[in-house]
């Protein structure tokens, strides 16, 4: 009797029932081209894919699977987050104890928390890498401008999800991260009690942005519940909405790898199995890596939150250390609010500023997009330089220690800082922006860019040496001057003159304003590190300092 | 009498569809804006359950010269040759608690590296304002009464009562 069991026959009988057909469309699987397309179109999970895709887009080294992996990490975070919610109670008396319970009492508790934490770190990294990939392949260009903007919003939401998550363990890192973060909200111009111009609107300690975030004036139980709701419900909900828009637009604007002009028409390949298999292999490898990492490395948990003791040094997770380091050189309202906002707006503006919609779309090219790639990579490079400084060069009291120096070495405290007189500082900023706006337009001569860059660099090094040997200066100061001159002349004048001169005036002005602000951030950092300049412009009456 | 109309009223231009819609949409947008405003108001609590900012901190005469750290209330009580004042132990940059380094005679913040003198003035680092001094008063019994809700950081004002006690 057992000999008569035929698995294939049983499966066929099963898939031919009314119940099966009501759940899974398409009926019996025949492994034909039509069935493979049907599998994509008829499946709620896969229907955002097209049925067929360009051969080039399936190549791993084109997309690196970065967008898909970001979404997969979001799914892991959702699942592990829901699991953790079963044990976690958002109250200052219980929260830290629940973390300890997860660590020592709950089966798989530590593992779930590790998975959640490390997936969050990985998601931030992969969302950033995905943005870089999209930029370098020119994939944000028409008709994808809007979706690039949605992507920027998703990057910010990813960072905000991480930020709202770290109050929940109620440990030392948590309370100080949230104290600093919400104080930045308080430094927002107009809507923060300690920001510029707030007093003009009657905004004070008990009606400003920080008060709304904290649910009070200090980090307490009201704050914990607010961040719990933000982290578990509100921000994931908003992120979900933006993810839906993002995916829908990817599908509608044409899937990956737009055609290269004059390219012979490619034969398209079927998404099932070609792309799906790659996506699932990527997801499985990521899962294996995260499981291994979570087994080997525990998520950090510091001592219980104590508003009277600040860890020394107190460091944010790596993806916020760039911002933390930037805050050393600027007032909180600038570094914490204005600069991040301008970066976000500037990123979103890129596709609308880009004058040539067809140049360098759908493949990696430096030759076709030298200016866009240089500026974008310079900004990214600066972000990671700040992260590296914050991670490896900062010791107790946020003092500069080289990685090979012991934190026990006694260092003299930082020297006093100076504030430029208002007329001098204001004049410098005015001159900087005026020259940056006007000079690139006035230069009529057509450069050979590589040789001119070399000349400027050589000149800057010479200048640095000359200033370096002057009395009352040093080689360090000379190096900072040389750096500033080289950066401003190459990025602020030479390259704009070569690449931006012929775009429309509105685009030129917006582009140059954003570019000059970016260079300005570098120059302010240089002024602070090299010459101990605290403010270029300071109007303490309205808390306005640059 | 009642059915006669003022001649001038007849000359008034009638309400056109354009003006009607302008005011109609205007009113609708104003309604939307005020709704958003009132929902935002929902997030600002009317009642706080936070500890009082006012507390007793021992006898005035018991404080030694130098900086005394009161962790429970997050204040520093500082006594110099002339008298005594209190400072809120909160960095004016982004709100961390700085540490006192007696050898260097300065407060140093661990988060972004701000440095303050014992008077509360910024010596180095990014902090934009001096530390806040808090109101200190002496009861007839000689107790020190601190109120963190009343603050001052301007030189000239912070060195006088009620932010300074001559001892």
Image (tube, coloured by chain):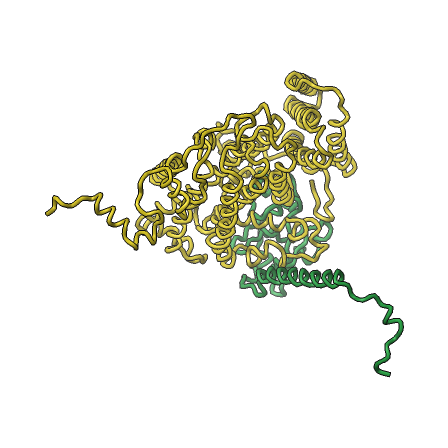
Chain colours: A yellow, B green
| Residue at figure coordinates x 52%, y 28% from the top left | A363
Q: x and y percent of residue B50 in the render?
A: 54, 61
**Residue furthest left as drawn:** A1
Residue A289 visible, this orientation: no
Image quadrant containing the C terminus of chain A: top right
Residue farthest toward the right in the current orientation of the protein: B7
Above or below, comparing residue A361 to residue A249 in the picture: above
| x, y percent for residue A312 | 51, 41
For residue B81, side relative to residue A389 (left or right): right
In which quadrant of the rendered view does residue A4 lie? top left
Q: Compared to A297, does B161 lie above or below?
A: below
Q: Nearer the viewer, residue B51 or A91?
A: A91
- In x, y percent, where is residue A394? 53, 35
Q: Residue furthest bottom?
A: B1
- Residue A311 in sight here: yes
The one nearer the camera, A355 or A435, is A355
Quick check: A239 left or right of A421?
left
Please state if A291 lies on the left or on the right of B55 as rendered. Answer: left
| Residue placed most toward the observer, A419 or A59 | A59
Q: Position of residue B115 (x, y in %)?
A: 61, 41
Who's the residue at 37% across and 43% down the image? Answer: A39
> Is A385 or A402 nearer to us in this picture?
A385
Q: Which of the 4 quarters of the picture holds residue A544?
A: top right
- Residue shown at 72%/35% (left/top)? A509
Label count reads 0
């Amino acid at each position: 009797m057992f000999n008569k069991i035929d698995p294939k026959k049983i499966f066929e009988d099963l898939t031919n029932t009314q119940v099966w057909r009501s759940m899974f469309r398409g009926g019996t699987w025949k492994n034909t081209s039509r069935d493979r397309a049907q599998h994509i179109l008829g499946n709620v999970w896969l229907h955002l894919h097209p049925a067929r895709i360009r051969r080039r887009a399936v190549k791993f080294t084109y997309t690196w699977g970065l967008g898909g992996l970001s979404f997969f990490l979001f799914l892991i975070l959702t699942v592990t987050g829901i699991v953790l919610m079963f044990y976690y109670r958002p109250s200052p008396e219980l929260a830290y104890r629940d973390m300890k319970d997860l660590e020592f009492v709950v089966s798989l508790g530590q593992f779930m928390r590790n998975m959640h934490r490390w997936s969050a770190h990985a998601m931030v990294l992969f969302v950033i890498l995905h943005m870089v990939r999209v930029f370098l392949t020119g994939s944000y260009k028409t008709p994808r401008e809007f979706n690039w903007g949605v992507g920027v919003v998703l990057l910010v939401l990813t960072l905000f999800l991480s930020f709202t998550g770290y109050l929940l363990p109620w440990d030392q890192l948590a309370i100080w991260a949230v104290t600093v973060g919400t104080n930045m909200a308080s430094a927002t111009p107009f809507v923060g009690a300690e920001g510029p111009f707030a007093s003009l609107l009657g905004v004070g300690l008990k009606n400003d942005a920080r008060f709304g975030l904290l649910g009070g004036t200090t980090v307490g139980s009201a704050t914990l519940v607010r961040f719990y709701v933000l982290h578990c419900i509100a921000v994931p909900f908003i992120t979900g909405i933006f993810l839906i828009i993002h995916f829908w637009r990817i599908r509608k604007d044409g899937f990956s790898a737009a055609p290269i002009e004059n390219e012979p028409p490619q034969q398209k390949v079927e998404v099932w199995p070609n792309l799906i298999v790659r996506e699932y292999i990527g997801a499985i490898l990521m899962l294996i890596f995260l499981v291994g990492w979570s087994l080997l490395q525990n998520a950090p948990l510091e001592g219980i939150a104590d508003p009277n003791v600040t860890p020394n040094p107190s460091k944010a997770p790596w993806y916020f250390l760039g911002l933390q380091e930037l805050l050393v050189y600027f007032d909180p309202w600038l570094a914490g609010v204005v600069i991040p906002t301008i970066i976000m707006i500037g990123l979103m503006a890129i596709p609308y500023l880009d004058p040539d919609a067809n140049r360098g779309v759908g493949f990696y090219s430096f030759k076709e997009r030298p200016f866009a790639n240089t500026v974008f990579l310079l900004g990214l490079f600066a972000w990671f330089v700040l992260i590296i400084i914050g991670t490896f060069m900062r010791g107790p009291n946020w003092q500069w220690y080289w990685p090979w120096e012991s934190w026990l070495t006694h260092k003299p405290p930082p020297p006093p800082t100076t504030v430029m007189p208002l007329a001098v500082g204001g004049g410098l900023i005015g001159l900087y922006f005026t020259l940056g706006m006007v000079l690139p337009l006035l230069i009529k001569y057509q450069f050979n860019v590589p040789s001119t860059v070399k000349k400027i660099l050589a000149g800057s090094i010479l200048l640095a040496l000359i200033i370096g040997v002057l009395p009352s200066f040093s080689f360090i100061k000379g190096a900072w001057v040389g750096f500033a001159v080289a950066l401003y002349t190459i990025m602020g004048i030479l390259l704009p003159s070569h690449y931006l001169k012929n775009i429309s005036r509105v685009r030129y002005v917006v582009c140059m304003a954003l570019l000059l602000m970016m260079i300005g951030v570098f120059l302010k950092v240089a002024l602070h590190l090299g010459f101990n300049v605290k403010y270029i412009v300071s109007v303490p009456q309205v808390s306005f300092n640059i | 009498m009642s059915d006669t109309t003022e001649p001038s009223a007849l000359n008034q231009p009638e309400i056109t569809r354009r003006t009607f819609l302008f005011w109609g949409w205007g009113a609708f947008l104003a309604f939307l804006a005020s709704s958003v405003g009132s929902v935002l108001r929902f997030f600002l609590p009317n009642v706080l359950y936070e500890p009082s900012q006012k507390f007793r901190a021992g006898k005035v005469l018991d404080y030694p010269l130098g900086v005394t750290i009161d962790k429970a209330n997050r204040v520093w009580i500082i006594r110099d040759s002339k008298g005594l004042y209190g400072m809120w132990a909160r960095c004016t940059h982004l709100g961390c608690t700085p540490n006192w380094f007696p050898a260097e005679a300065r407060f140093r913040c661990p988060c972004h590296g701000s440095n303050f003198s014992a008077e509360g003035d910024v010596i180095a680092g990014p902090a934009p304002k001096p530390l806040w001094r808090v109101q200190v008063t002496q009861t007839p019994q000689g107790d020190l009464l601190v109120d963190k809700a009343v603050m001052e950081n301007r030189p000239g004002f912070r060195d006088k009562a009620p932010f300074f006690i001559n001892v």
